[in-house]
Image (cartoon, rainbow, N blue to C red):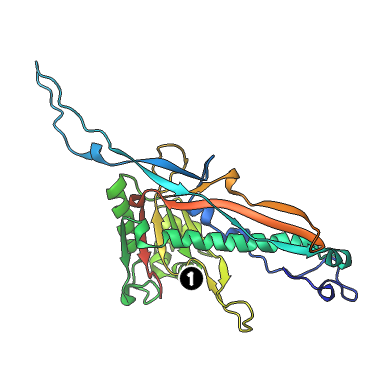
Amino acid sequence: MSYQQTDVHVNKPLTDYAIRFLQDDANFIADKVAPKVNSIKLADKYYTYDRAPWRQSDDLRKAGTQSNKGVTANLSTAAFLIEKYSLHDVVPDDVMDEADSPIEPQQDTVADLVEQLMINKEIRCKDEFFVTSSVQNYTSLATASQWGYTSTTTPIDDFDTGNFAIQKEIGKESNQATIGNEVYKVLKNHEDILDRIKYTQKGIITADIIAACMDIDSLLIGKGIYMTTGEGITSESMSYIWGKNMLIQYVSPRPSKKRLTHGSQFVKKGGGASVKSFYDDKADGQYVEPSIYYDFKAVSKLCGYTIFGAVA
């Protein structure tokens, strides 16, 4: 954040009120789409197993004979690379000295930089998982089948198709789905949902109610927003980060070694933002630099199914 002295000292300011454009923390869902896995090293490997033991085999052992040799899973490895993401700014002494309450230049600067890091992280998560290469199966809805096209389109049936595809691949039903806010707006007013609950629910349709209709544990709604226009352009334009698709997943409820799951977020130092701060003699101000470490990976694409173009 760039402060000028005239920006932080005004006549008779309201000391308990200031406008800040910080998004709600609940808007950011990356940590739920891909739960964190702590790593000591920035770069390492993890093991993967195939489905060889699922093959039908001859296990009949007759008297006086030796049993047939069973099939075990083939073991392989995949790699991850945790990157460090950082931004910095310098808060001049003159700015901090002249700032009236409730302006806190150093704290406000850190908050703004962390906000940028979180928006970038959310976009990277979306870019990793909302692509065909991150899932085994997917579909793209034609215009007439998109959920907002008519009230007779079938979002629950479309979801079931994805759920059954995952179940066929891994032997487990999906338990989580991720949508953008524009998809949620359509779903909570869709006849397919309203018809399922008209005798049991009253009032506002929530994400939990839609999740129950689809028989999953949670429906994540990406409400994060980013500015699509560059710096210096006066006609600013905003867009939802998560777009108009639906990602259906099986996510391990208790992430641990050897547990099957769709996506993981490999992190170092707990995956939270750490802030470095020191006095910059050349700039006559306080240097602040928040950093965060992570790497998003679709560790088992068999556990995912994407509906592209769920709404127009």
Q: Is residue 23 above or below residue 11?
A: above
Q: Residue furthest bottom?
A: 235
| Residue 214 appearing in the image | no
The residue at the point 41 percent across, 46 percent down is: 79
Q: Quadrant of the N terminus?
A: bottom right
- What amino acid type should be assigned to the residue bearing mark 1? Glu
For residue 21, side relative to residue 279 (left or right): left
For residue 155, side relative to residue 109 (left or right): left
The residue at the point 64 percent across, 60 percent down is: 87
Q: Position of residue 172 (x, y in %)?
A: 34, 45
Q: Is residue 133 above or below residue 51?
A: below
Q: Quadrant of the C terminus?
A: bottom left
**Residue annotated with mark 1:** 182
Q: Position of residue 12 (x, y in %)?
A: 90, 74
The residue at the point 58 percent across, 63 percent down is: 119
**Figure quadrant of residue 75:** top left
